[in-house]
Image (tube, rainbow, N blue to C red):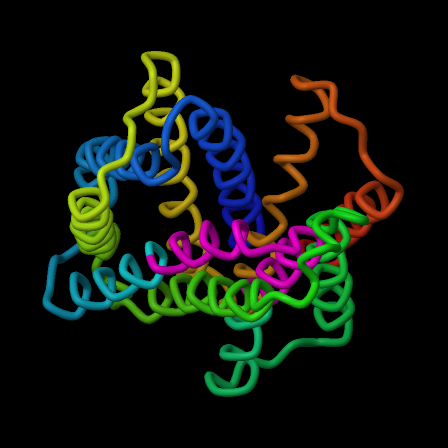
Amino acid sequence: MGSLLALGAALGFGVSDYTGGLAARRGSALTVTLLGQVAGLLALVPALVLVAGRPSFAALGYGAAAGLFGSLGLVLYLRCMALGPMGVISPVAALVGAAVPVLWAVGLAGERLDPRDVAGVVAGLAAVVLVAYRRGAGRAAAGSRGPLVAAGAGAAFGLFLVLLDATPGDSGLWPLVGSRLAGIGLLAALVRARPRPWPSTDGRRLAVVSGVTDQLANVSFLLATRTGLLSLASLLTSLYPVVVLVLARQLLHERLTRPQAGGVALALLTSVLIAA
């Protein structure tokens, strides 16, 4: 069940990234993200009734810290995409974002993996890099500090997953309330400090879809960590770029490179090894 929930989280994050990316073409990425965060918070309200949980300072506090790291990761990621090179930035951010919770769980939390799981983790990390890599993109900016900022973004995304896992097991979905409130507060402050254009009507609709699916993915990941290992749940969740690639291939008719096709195959192998 934990593996299925983690794969559901990957599906949700993939759909959220795809629709959010389309929305960002119709407005500022910051305003699109803020709209999505608000929509996700509203979508969480009925889920709080369906999933029993007890609100507490630890639940809301860890959730708020996770939300701040998640929002910080987003800001850093947008910044490093402007710095370049994109062909290095995407795989660096993806690899670090997947590796941080795995290393935390195995190195500090004492989770033990059997050989099949270890093979799945190695294949999964390789799949994340291959899927995110774009050959030849932004080579002119290879000397910039973009890759370093990308590593910081990936670390922030990874810590978001680690902090959600650290929330009390009896807290239900309340940590996500703290996460959303903290994220909305940070993004609203950024938008207020540096005003950005709001998306068009179509962009707002896509932003709402992105925010709701992102919240559903958060719910799936949080439940996955409570029924399985953080290392494996975070690794499977980090395969969400595969979903983005498939959607772009089917709906936007974008072509996959050979490394990306190999990454998709490795992602499938990862899922089989871990879920078996």
- At 22% from the left edge and 43% from the top edge, which residue is drawn? 191
Q: Quadrant of the C terminus?
A: bottom right
Q: Image quarter for residue 140? A: bottom right
Picture quadrant where residue 236 is located: bottom right
Q: In the orientation shown, which residue stands out farthest toward the right?
A: 258
The residue depicted at 36 percent of the width and 46 percent of the height is 219
Position of 275 compared to 19: left or right? right
Q: Is residue 155 above or below residue 34?
A: below
The stretch drawn in magenta includes residue 79? yes
Left/right placement of residue 156 relative to residue 184 reads: right
Main SS of the magenta part reads helix
Residue in front for this viewpoint, 43 or 77: 77
Vertical position of residue 229 compared to residue 108: above or below: above
From the top left corner, tell me how far across and down residue 93 is, in percent: 58, 60
Q: Establish if 43 lies above or below 68.
A: above
- Residue 52 seen in the current view: no
Range of the magenta residues? Answer: 72-98
- What x and y, as percent, mark residue 214? 40, 39
Query: Of residues 48 and 257, which is closer to you in this image?
Result: 257
Name the spot of residue 160 as percent of width and height, x first: 38, 63
Residue 52 painted magenta: no
User: Measuring 67% from the left and 67% from the top, which residue is drawn there?
Assistant: 143
> Does 11 sit above or below residue 185?
above
Specify whether 196 is left or right of 149: left
Q: Is residue 131 left or right of residue 168?
A: right
Give the tally of numbered discs. Answer: 0
Visible in this render: residue 180? yes
Residue beneath the point at 43% across and 58% down? 76
The percent position of residue 175, horizontal first and vertical second, equals 23, 57
